[in-house]
């Protein structure tokens, strides 16, 4: 029988994957076909060959499908003499299905136990390191390393939702989320597919900043247009969102279920092709980034603009999401960045290949008001280390700011610096991303920079502009007890959390569904 394609298997539910295991035990697939199925299982955090071998032992057949003595003629066989009846008289397939169902239910219960325990500890300010996580998982009898990390990530999201649901001032919420990140375990268990696709979850403090910049918690849309998250993961970017106002998409079945447990309605489609039900007023995404190699050792092509394609999966997903945004919509994109720190090297990288084409289209068609890079070191606990770019968009149309090939995005390398992003106005962001004549000339002449003479403006090590002073900020307000104001506090007077007309988050640390 023909082996399902990888694209088809990406959309399989757990029951369909279990059926592939049973069919493999019955000898329906060639060795090459089983290798292809194993890749699909790897992408979903399951070990195909281990499951096949386990089922073979349970029903007593070898790799050729041969069992023990033939059963009596009255008992059902597969036509080749292989007994398909269990000791109770039911078919081996039926018995295996029951065992699979019981196993899945037990592992799901164990997953939820680990998730809720991690959420409770972190929400109470108690650190959970790898050793403690391993003990929690062992006590719950959750076995696979990837599933343990997924449960921990789900717990992190629940803890973060509880923190933002308190409605504290922005600075306090942000500082608490930074501490949450410091208290969380390193999440290092990744499948080969997730490593290749650079598919890593967003750290809680960065997710909160992105959510604020995308205005997720504000009732901005008078027409009630929903929020769009096309690669929603476990929901970290949606910690301020009312689940009822979100169009979420997530292909991974475990993560999709985690989203449903929080109250989200979830699609499970290819994000490069997904068509949401309606236009969105807010877009917030952190898709997997980079290139993906095919079995033919070539880079996979993804839809881009019109009939064009791109090898960068994050560019494809970003354009697809933005095409669904309303004319006056707000968006924050978290995409793969540039590893270089030298300003000239960064300008060149942003002006080369798929990146040049993507950013030219983006800046010509969407009002990019800010673009900055977050150092990969701030991603370490998520199992990553590559820098990412945060792009803030306020509607469709020509961007009022300059391309990254002219002004390389500033590099943020500490949580303190990231927190100050909560204080800036849109006008200040635009000013920081608008080039002077000297900068434009410097970007054009490149290696001939010496000839620019005194006209060349100073450039900061992170690629920022040295000839323009930082916008003057108001004095930091004082707490009644004399404490200093922190990022976001006093600058806007805003508080974290869902819109005022929705219920707050409750019972999330214990696994209850979020109401916001």
Image (spheres, rainbow, N blue to C red):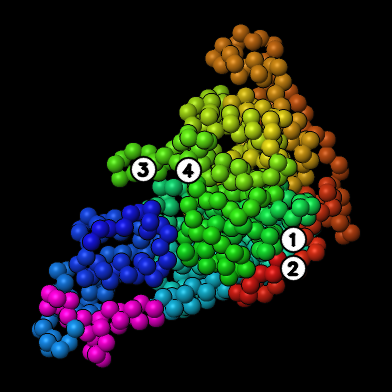
**Residue at the disc numbered 2:** 504
Q: Are marks 2 and 1 in contact (CB under 8 Å)?
A: yes
Q: First in sequence, mark 2 or 4: give its number.
A: 4
Quadrant location, the N terminus: bottom left
In magenta segment, residue 80: yes
Above or below for 382 versus 359: below
In the image, residue 40 sits, relative to residue 50, either above or below, namely above
Which tag is nearer the camera, tag 4 or tag 1? 4
Residue at 62% from the left image edge and 24% from the top image edge: 406
Q: Position of residue 421 (x, y in %)?
A: 72, 44
Distance, label 3 to label 1, CA atoms, is: 40 Å
**Residue at left offset 50%, top offset 48%:** 273
Q: CA distance from mark 2 to mark 4?
A: 35 Å
Helix, strand or loop status at disc 3: loop
Asked if the stretch drawn in magenta spans residue 236, the answer is: no
Q: Residue at x 59, y 49 (%)?
A: 285
Image quadrant where residue 6 sits? bottom left
Residue 188 percent location from the top left of the image: 45, 57
Look at the numbered disc 2 and give the secondary structure of its residue: loop
To which residue does mark 4 refer? 313
Q: Position of residue 288 (x, y in %)?
A: 49, 48
The magenta stretch is: 77-102
Residue at 22% in and 55% down:
32
Label 1: element kind: loop
| Residue 195 coordinates in the image, percent (x, y) | 42, 50
Query: Which secondary structure lies at badge 4?
Result: helix
Callout 4: few (<14), some (14-19), or many (20+) C-alpha neighbours within 10 Å? many
The residue singled out by tag 1 in the image is 497
Would you identify the image quadrant in which residue 236 lies? bottom right
């Amino acid at each position: 029988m023909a082996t399902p394609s990888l694209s088809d298997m990406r959309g399989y539910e757990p029951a369909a994957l279990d059926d592939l295991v049973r069919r493999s035990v019955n000898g329906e697939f060639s060795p090459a076909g089983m290798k292809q199925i194993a890749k699909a299982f790897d992408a979903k955090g399951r070990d195909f060959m281990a499951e096949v071998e386990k089922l073979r032992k349970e029903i007593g057949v070898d790799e050729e499908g041969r069992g023990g003595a033939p059963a009596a003629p009255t008992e059902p066989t597969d036509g080749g003499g292989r007994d398909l009846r269990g000791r109770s008289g039911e078919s081996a397939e039926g018995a295996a299905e029951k065992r699979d169902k019981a196993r899945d239910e037990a592992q799901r219960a164990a997953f939820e136990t680990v998730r809720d325990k991690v959420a409770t500890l972190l929400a109470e300010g108690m650190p959970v390191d790898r050793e403690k996580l391993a003990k929690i998982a062992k006590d719950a009898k959750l076995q696979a390393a990837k599933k343990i990390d997924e449960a921990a990530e789900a717990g992190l999201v629940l803890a973060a939702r509880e923190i933002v649901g308190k409605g504290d001032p922005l600075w306090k919420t942000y500082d608490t989320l930074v501490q949450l990140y410091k208290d969380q375990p390193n999440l290092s268990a990744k499948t080969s597919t997730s490593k290749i696709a650079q598919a890593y979850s967003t750290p809680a403090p960065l997710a909160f900043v992105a959510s604020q910049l995308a205005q997720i918690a504000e009732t901005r849309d008078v027409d009630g247009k929903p929020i769009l998250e096309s690669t929603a993961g476990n929901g970290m970017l949606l910690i301020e969102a009312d689940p009822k106002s979100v169009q979420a998409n997530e292909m991974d079945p475990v993560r999709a279920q985690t989203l449903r447990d929080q109250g989200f309605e979830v699609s499970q489609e290819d994000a490069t092709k997904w068509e949401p039900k309606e236009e969105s007023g807010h877009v917030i995404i952190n898709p997997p980034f980079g290139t993906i190699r095919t079995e033919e050792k070539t880079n996979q092509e993804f839809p881009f603009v019109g009939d064009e394609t791109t090898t960068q999966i994050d560019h494809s997903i970003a354009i697809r999401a933005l095409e669904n945004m309303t004319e006056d919509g707000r968006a924050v994109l978290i995409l793969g960045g540039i590893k270089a720190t030298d300003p000239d090297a960064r300008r060149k990288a942003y002006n080369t290949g798929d990146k040049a084409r993507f950013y030219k289209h983006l800046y010509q068609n969407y009002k990019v008001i800010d673009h900055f890079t977050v150092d990969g070191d701030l991603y370490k606990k998520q199992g990553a280390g590559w820098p990412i770019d945060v792009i803030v968009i306020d509607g469709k149309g020509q961007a009022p700011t300059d391309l990254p090939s002219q002004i390389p995005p500033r590099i943020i390398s500490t949580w303190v610096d990231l927190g100050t992003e909560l204080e800036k106005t849109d006008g200040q962001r635009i000013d920081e991303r608008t080039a002077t004549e000297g900068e434009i000339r410097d970007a054009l002449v490149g290696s001939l920079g010496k000839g620019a003479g005194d006209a060349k403006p100073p450039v900061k090590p992170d690629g920022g502009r040295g000839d323009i002073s930082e916008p003057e900020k108001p004095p930091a307000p004082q707490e009644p007890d004399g404490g200093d104001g922190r990022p976001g506090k006093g600058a806007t007077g805003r508080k974290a959390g869902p819109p005022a007309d929705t219920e707050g988050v409750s019972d999330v640390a214990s696994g209850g569904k979020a109401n916001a």
